[in-house]
Image (cartoon, grey):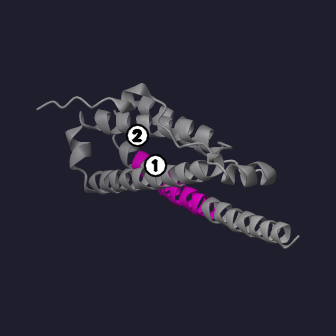
C-alpha cells in the first residue's frame, strides 16, 4: 500500500514539475516573440520616414513606394506567426528593392537624412534577425519538450502546443546575393 502511495506522490510531483517546465518554456517563447514584435514595430516606424525622405526626389520610382506602402499596410493584419512571417518577408523584399533603386540616385544616396535612415533600417534588420533566431530557438526547445517522452504525456493532457517557426518564405532570400564590384 505504501509503495502505491509513494508511486502516486512521485508521479504527481513529476507531473507538477513538468507542467511548470512547460509554463517556463511557453513564457520564454512569448518573451522571444515580444522581442520580434519590438523590432517589427521599430521597422514599421522607420518606413514612413524613409518614404518621406525618398518622396523629396520627385523622379523616384512611384511603383516602389506604392508597393512599400501596401506591404506596410499588410503588416498590421497578420494573425499568427506564420502569417506574420509571410507579410514581413514581403516588407523585407520591398525595402531591399527600395534601397537597390536608391543606388541609381546619387543625390538621394548623398542625403544625410537618407544615410541615417538607411543605417537605422539596416541596424533594425540585424536586430530583427537576432530576435527571429532567438524566437525560433525557444520554439525549438518548447517543441522538444512537448514531443519528448514522457513530458509529451503532460503536453497532451494540458494541450501544450508549440507555435510555428518564423521562417523565410522566399527562395531568393536563401540564396547568396550577387556581389558586383
Q: Nearer the viewer, residue 92 or 159?
A: 159
Q: Is residue 50 above or below residue 103?
A: below
Which stretch appears magenta?
27-51
Residue ID for mark 1: 47
| Residue at which label 2 appears | 95
Q: Quadrant of residue 9?
A: bottom right
Residue 23, position as x, y percentages in the image: 68, 64
The residue lying toward the viewer, choosing from 71 and 144, is: 144
Badge 1 vs badge 2, beta-carbon distance below 8 Å: yes
**Rendered view: 61 above or below 115:** above
Q: Is residue 80 left or right of residue 133?
A: right
> What secondary structure is found at the residue carrying circle 1?
helix
Quarter of the figure with the C terminus: top left
Task: Pick the residue in front: 13 or 164.
Answer: 13
Tell me which secondary structure the magenta stretch mostly adopts.
helix
Q: Is residue 54 left or right of residue 131?
A: left
**Precedes in sequence: disc 1 or disc 2:** 1
Q: Please rate how many residues cluster around mark 2, counting C-alpha atoms within 10 Å: few if below 14, some from 14 to 19, many from 20.
A: many
The answer, for residue 58, to whether it is visible in the render is no
Name the spot of residue 57 as percent of width and height, x first: 33, 41
Which residue is pictured at 43% across the width and 48% down the height?
Answer: 52
Q: Where in the figure is residue 163, as x and y percent of width and height?
A: 63, 46
For the residues labelled 1 and 2, the Cα–Cα distance comes to 8 Å
| Residue for point 24% across, 36% down | 103
- Asked whether residue 172 is in view, the answer is yes
Identify the residue shown where x is 54% and y is 59%. 32
Q: Residue furthest right?
A: 1
Amino acid at each position: 500500500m505504501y509503495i502505491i502511495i509513494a508511486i502516486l506522490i512521485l508521479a504527481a510531483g513529476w507531473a507538477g514539475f513538468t507542467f511548470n517546465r512547460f509554463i517556463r518554456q511557453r513564457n520564454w517563447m512569448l518573451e522571444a516573440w515580444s522581442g520580434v514584435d519590438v523590432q517589427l514595430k521599430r521597422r514599421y516606424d522607420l518606413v514612413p520616414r524613409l518614404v518621406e525622405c525618398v518622396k523629396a526626389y520627385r523622379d523616384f520610382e512611384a511603383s516602389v513606394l506604392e508597393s512599400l506602402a501596401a506591404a506596410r499596410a499588410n503588416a498590421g493584419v497578420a494573425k499568427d506567426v506564420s502569417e506574420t512571417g509571410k507579410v514581413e518577408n514581403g516588407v523585407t523584399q520591398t525595402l531591399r528593392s527600395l534601397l537597390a533603386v536608391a543606388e541609381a540616385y546619387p543625390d538621394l544616396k548623398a542625403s544625410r537624412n537618407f544615410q541615417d535612415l538607411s543605417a537605422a533600417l539596416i541596424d533594425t534588420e540585424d536586430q530583427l534577425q537576432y530576435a527571429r533566431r532567438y524566437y525560433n530557438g525557444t520554439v525549438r526547445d518548447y517543441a522538444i519538450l512537448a514531443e519528448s517522452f514522457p513530458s509529451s504525456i503532460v503536453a497532451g493532457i494540458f494541450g501544450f502546443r508549440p507555435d510555428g517557426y518564423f521562417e523565410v518564405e522566399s527562395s531568393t532570400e536563401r540564396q547568396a546575393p550577387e556581389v558586383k564590384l
